[in-house]
Image (cartoon, rainbow, N blue to C red):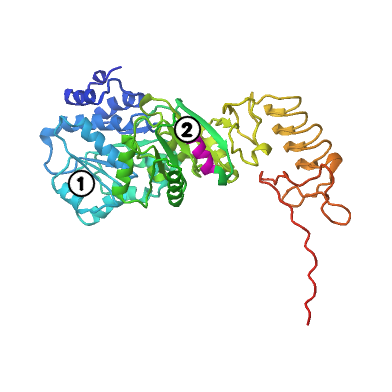
Amino acid sequence: MQFQDLKLIDPLLRALHDEGYDEPTPVQQQAIPHVLVGRDLVGCAQTGTGKTAAFALPILQRLIAANQNRQRGVIRVLVLSPTRELASQIGESFTSYGRYTGLKNIVIFGGVGQQPQVQALRRGPDILVATPGRLLDLMNQGMVKLNSVEVFVLDEADRMLDMGFIHDVRRVISALPTKRQTLLFSATMPQDIQDLADRILDNPVHIEVTPQATTVEKIDQSVYFVDKKDKPALLAHLLGDRAIRRVLVFTRTKHGANKLVQHLERGYVQAEAIHGNKSQTARERALENFKSGKTRVLVATDIAARGIDVDDVTHVINYDLPNIPESYVHRIGRTARAGASGIAFSFCDSDEREFLRDIEKLIRLRVPVVSDHPFVSSGASASLPVSNSRGGGQRQQSWSGRPASDGGRSRSGGSSNGQANRNSGGLNGQPSRASNGGTNGQPSRASNGGTNGQSSHASNGGATNTFNDSRPMASVNREGDLSHQSNAQLTGALDADGAPHRSRRRRRPRRPQQA
């Protein structure tokens, strides 16, 4: 299918040709015909699938068709966006697609002075793209009137919910005319967003290009289990591969983003940070440097995850796994845009295992594990399936701690639920490091030991004391001293969370103080 098959007018086709677009994406094929005839619409599609053009093109055409009846100097279209970067991107799209139409658009958002935006509003734009906070501020000042809006677009609705803007969105909607066309786009469709759609849309058309919360098929995903302290070194190790030409690195906090940039620059890697504490000028400069190739690494927080639309992002690295599973989908959607392929790496420390489990549940996919790297976490051996690779960074097809369907190969015998087993034993799907040990799924380091699922480090039993938190304790003799017999060394012992267990020396009784 070509764009002309969608019955778009010549000014729009010329603009699309200038941009190098000939074939519409699936979301554009489904959405454009319905929007052209004025239907309300709910679109559920991943980031990077062409959603902006799916509503911008038909909106521009409808405005041109009704141009003879337009009232001068009023806002006819309102597009609400959760972030400044995404608002800017949408505004650029309207400018590009509408270059031959004579229609004007402006973008308003916070973080910058409002006076230039107020002056632009006084010139009477046809299309207003805004973030909720600055829009409500200008509405309260009487600078923005929405009583003539013909089309309302709520973009990235789930992100609005995540960022706590849902009440602001309701206030904006209450100022809109009842008779209007409403379009709602979202990468995921939680129940709160579905309830909002039911209230504000009139008999909408529903389109869903891909299953909700799935990740783009052309993104090659993998996870690295690594201790938190080793994450900077692992990132530097990966960046040694020059195939990683343009990479987005996501951190959980603003402070973490700044700290990581400083670390990279000490290693002579050109990097910049973009997050909410940066001024708008600094954010725009960092984004422009990244687009132009001047900056190889852009470190960002989730606030920027949906506003970064840069071609040819080869890699996305989740330096910190997001605690909101949907954010993972939006982060890695920054690569493999417009039909290209991409690669997404995720670092996972012991505190982030639950986040990974939630992500895999959401995307209905087990992220393959890379076990051949220099910084495998100290707890990975107790929780990861054994890699059947011989080197070269090949990946496992299942995550630790859960059964893998048709999963990991067994090196010897045993291994229920398809997980790897170094010898025999290893019930409930976890690896056993030696024979006849490690019941209930935890590794046994020596023979005939380790009852109740805990590690045994002494031959023939090495009595294991287990407290309420189920952590393996050291072997003790009758006098209560730590046993130092052969094969009962404490070095290498693992706590339940996979971290090295370090014994404490028995404290000597304190001598009474002299009077």
Which quadrant of the rendered structure holds the N terminus? Answer: top left
Residue in view at x 33 percent, y 31 percent: 51
Q: Locate residue 390: give its quadrant.
A: top right
| Chain part drawn in magenta | 231-240
- Whether residue 154 is visible here, answered yes or no, is no
Which quarter of the rendering shows the C terminus? Answer: bottom right
Along the line of sight, the residue nearer the viewer: 44 or 22: 22
Identify the main secondary structure in magenta. helix
> Can you name the residue that lies furthest to the bottom here?
515
228 or 23: nearer the eye? 228
Of label 2 and label 1, which has the lower sequence position?
Answer: 1
Instruction: Quote the CA–CA distance across marks 2 and 1.
Output: 44 Å
412 versus 92 height, above or below: above
Residue type (three-letter) at the residue carrying disc 2 = Ala
What residue is shown with label 2?
Answer: 344
Image coordinates for residue 201, horizontal then vertical, percent: 33, 38
Please provide percent x and percent y for residue 336. 40, 28
Check if residue 279 falls in the magenta segment: no
Q: Who's the residue at 54% across and 34% down the image?
A: 223
Q: Which residue is mark 1?
A: 147
